[in-house]
Image: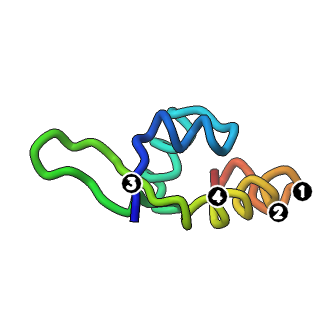
Amino acid sequence: MKRYTIGKMAKLNNVTEQTLRLYDKMGLFKPAYVDEHNGYRLYDIGQSARLDIIQYLKNLGKIGRAHV
């Protein structure tokens, strides 16, 4: 499966790279793969659905600042 950089994944899902880093730090949305040599986060397209759900719940107020 094709892997996407954090920048490409952010752009595809209309979020910022900082948001993806925060979600990773919180354990809410982890990258599919982290390169051992340079630490780059890489995502697969299947993760977009999970990110959409997170954003949807956030917009509904179901996930508050305590979670995100």
Give above or below for 49 relative to 13.
Answer: below
Quarter-wise, where is residue 12 in the image?
A: top right
**Quick one: label 3 or label 4, which is nearer the N terminus?**
3
- Residue that carries the numbered disc 2 in the rendered image: 62
- Disc 4 versus disc 2: nearer the observer: 4
For residue 3, above or below residue 21: below
Which is more foreground, mark 1 or mark 3? 3
Outermost residue toward the right in this view: 60
**Mark closer to the chain start, 1 or 3:** 3
Across and down, in percent, residue 22 comes to: 50, 44
Q: Amino acid at mark 1?
A: Leu
Q: Relative to 66, is 32 on the left or the right?
A: left
In the structure shown, which secondary structural element does the residue marked by tag 4 occupy?
helix
Which residue is labeled 4 in the image? 51
Residue beneath disc 1: 60
Q: Quadrant of residue 38?
A: top left
The secondary structure type at the circle numbered 1 is helix
Give the residue pinned by disc 3. 3
Which part of the image, by quadrant, shows the N terminus?
A: bottom left
Q: Nearer the viewer, mark 2 or mark 3?
A: 3
Callout 4 amino acid: Leu
Of the numbered discs 4 and 2, the one sitting upstream in the chain is 4
